[in-house]
Amino acid sequence: MTKLAPSGHLTIGDHQLEYRMIGSSPAEAPTLVLLHEGLGSVGLWGDFSDKLAAATGAGVFVYSRAGYGQSSPAALPRKVDYMHREALDVLPRVLDAIGFQRGLFVGHSDGASIAAIYAGGVPDHRIRGVTLIAPHFVVEDISVQSIAAIKQAYETTELRAKLARWHKDVDNAFRGWNDAWLDPAFRSWDIADHLAYIRVPVQIVQGTDDQYGTLRQIAIAKAECYCPIETVILPNTGHAPHREATEATLRAVSDFANRLLQDHGEAVRGDAA
């Protein structure tokens, strides 16, 4: 496996997926794979990915799913099971393409749901644990209401122009996510059954003021999971803890990763967070 360049594109099926690699390559050191939110991308992680690499010493791999960032567009409309497809069809090929050997997933929102589906659906001994930031396991009324509101904002305010800074095909990114969540069939979307099959420690980071989900998501995880669960509830924090409460989120995620890597004799802790 050729060492990954610091940034570029991976060819995965018919798509070119934008990526960024920080620190050691997956063939050389444990790697934290970051999975972005429903309107996220490589760029929208900001410097959180760099800070996470510094706080753990692990490599950090970030990529934009098809339709997001500088990746090639996705076919629309997305199916209701699009997160299952990302977790079970695409993500395994991404891990193979980068030569992933061992590490953790850090997923946010849709990315957290994708991480949970993978961890519960793919028997992969390389995964040491998963951090789920503002995950969705079921669809709540608050989620649909907020997603309907952001659709109106996209059509009537400067939101589209702001998002266009981060996505080369902003309509593909927005419509792919927004239309899927507002599809009436999506109200029955439920991945709680995957949680019972996760066999590695899980960390859930949730803001008390999350406009897209409530603490019910944590209650579902505690009821369904047999694996160890750690929860970090951040007050006065919305749907993006890594942007709104960066230091607290960084400390929690890096401490969790460092402990698990140490438990496997793979600790490579870097600078203090």
Image (tube, rainbow, N blue to C red):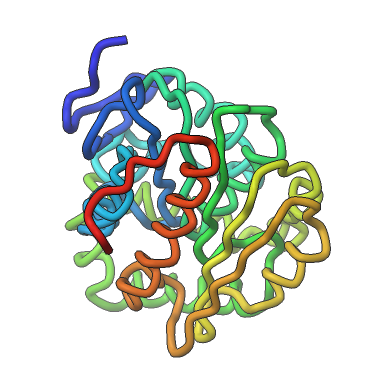
201 lies left or right of 161: right
Q: Nearer the viewer, residue 266 or 96?
A: 266
Q: Quadrant of residue 198?
A: top right
Residue 260 is situated, as x and y percent measured from the top left of the image, at 52, 47
Nearest the eye: 164 or 152:
164
Height in image: 24 above or below 188?
Answer: above
Point out residue 165 in the picture as x, y percentages from the top left corner: 17, 57
Look at the image and tell me in which quarter the C terminus lies: bottom left
Q: Is residue 62 visible?
A: no
Residue 219 found in image quarter: bottom right
Q: Residue at x 68, y 69 (%)?
A: 217
Q: Residue at x 48, y 88 (%)?
A: 235
Q: Position of residue 266 (x, y in %)?
A: 43, 35
The percent position of residue 269, horizontal first and vertical second, equals: 32, 47
Q: Residue at x 67, y 60 (%)?
A: 229
Let me know if residue 6 appears in the view. yes
> Is residue 78 shown left or right of residue 100?
right
Q: Residue furthest top?
A: 1
